[in-house]
Amino acid sequence: MRIPHATTEAPATRRPAGTSAPSTAGPSTIKGVPGVHSETTSTGARTRSQHQRRKRIVQAAAALASRGGVEAMQMRTVAERAGVALGTLYRYFPSKMDLVVAVVGEEIDLLESSIERRPPSATTPSGRAVDVLMRATRGLMREPELADALIRSLILAEVETPFGDRMTDLLLRVTADGVTVRTATEEQFALVGSLSSVWVQELLEMLRGRRTHEQIQRRIEIAAARLLADFDAPPSAPK
Amino acid sequence: MRIPHATTEAPATRRPAGTSAPSTAGPSTIKGVPGVHSETTSTGARTRSQHQRRKRIVQAAAALASRGGVEAMQMRTVAERAGVALGTLYRYFPSKMDLVVAVVGEEIDLLESSIERRPPSATTPSGRAVDVLMRATRGLMREPELADALIRSLILAEVETPFGDRMTDLLLRVTADGVTVRTATEEQFALVGSLSSVWVQELLEMLRGRRTHEQIQRRIEIAAARLLADFDAPPSAPK
DNA sequence: CCGCAAACTAGAACGGATTCTAGTGTTTGT
DNA sequence: ACAAACACTAGAATCCGTTCTAGTTTGCGG
């Protein structure tokens, strides 16, 4: 029998030692959780312990990435810090990128709730859009290494990109009152999406050290003023 | 600033060991190398042979990338196909990314000369911009694997890449008559740059299979109409 | 022709992501 | 309670980018 390597802070797994189920808050669509092929009937306790394991992994990953960027976030190290075996880490996140995406998800959640807590106060739609984007920029740039890792990885993602889409949705909500992804016209969607594209690229330029905060703000303002002109003063509505 | 024509690089000295440079020298750290960019046969055979070697390398890389993408473009394989040793390959291109950048450079050269040969015929600046961007899109999508590899790699690049900049310059030239990177106002530059950003992101979406050719065209048109409105009908100069 | 320095070659070595192996708990169905 | 199924672990193995080593070739100045 193997002795539990107590080297890390979380030996884990021996005993889930959990409390009563708190009804598992949070997003139920967990991506890399093992045991997917099993029917839904299974497991109350297992799920919880797995939940915690996953959480520890993501936390360890974020901590490593926040200083040193992706390079510092090595799979072996993440596994070690999280107190799981490398194979287990790969069971939860089939690739490094999946792990990065998970970390990003948390960041976006943060921004979203921040905006709910304190909505943009500008009077014009484009003003509110700029507000949101600059707030997102500041939030991301608080941990440049992390931001760098996250942005790049998301752009690379083969499939779904929760980033651009969620940001577009966010912008849509703060610019056009009551409009959501489902009710927006093709044109509205394209325009807000374009603004989001511009922001992403500007962010990248900033991470490359080719933009200052002020330059980004200026350029976003210029782009927003043009792209969202119809939102600010709808042509169908007289002034 | 350095050279306007990065198409002629030459072997440079090795970069320092240790971690990969975070944001140091760009892809073309040119060091004192016998007149490579000169057609003059002064120093003779060596230069020419190096030129050819470089060409063979880039061709081999492009050929490999055009099917199979970046993954298929393995440094060992490139070296083998080009008939050079791995060490030599690394002397010419200090990293895989530098090689990718070189391949992209050729693609952009192609587009540039195509545009010189047959300039966009639309009457409005935004129309010409859309023309150029769609032509670039078609050109790139002719080799989707290659395009995918190139675009992603370039966006990921730590350092500056000639991609966005050259495209922006190109757009500037076809939209505002006689305006170049050096003479454009900050606003013009920001607007054209934004359009370029939108295009890049749309291209990415297409590569992800989330856009058709027509959708891209539509969205680019929408964005261009707004972003380049002042170019189409300058507020200061009545038509 | 000589010798030097840079460029080239073949191949080993190294590092990090990803995969594979074998074995040890742990959960679940009956 | 027992066995099949599954989650986990430690560690070896593999793949590919990059670096390093040692020896060979090439071109140029003298």
Image: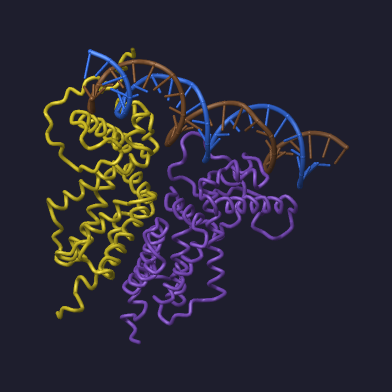
Chain colours: A yellow, B purple, C brown, D blue
Residue depicted at 51% across the width and 65% down the height? B139
How many numbered circles does the render carry? 0
Q: Is residue A14 above or below residue B203?
A: above
Q: On the picture, is A238 further left or further right than B65?
A: left
Q: Is residue B221 above or below residue B14?
A: below
- Image quarter hosting the C terminus of chain B: bottom left
Toward the bottom, the furthest residue is B239
Q: On the picture, is B122 further left or further right than A130?
A: right
Q: Residue B179 in the image: x percent, y percent?
A: 44, 73
> Is residue A63 visible from the viewing direction of this image?
no
Q: On the picture, is B136 further left or further right than A199?
A: right
Residue depicted at 46% across the width and 66% down the height? B169
Q: Residue A168 in the image: x percent, y percent?
A: 26, 59
Q: Is residue D27 above or below residue A172?
A: above
Residue depicted at 34% across the width and 29% down the height? A88
Task: Give residue B122's quadrant in the image.
Answer: bottom left
> Is residue B71 visible from the viewing direction of this image?
yes
Q: Is residue D1 above or below residue C21?
A: above
Q: Residue B10 in the image: x percent, y percent?
A: 62, 50
Q: Residue A107 in the image: x percent, y percent?
A: 25, 45
Q: Considering depth in this image, is C19 or B237 the residue closer to the camera? A: C19
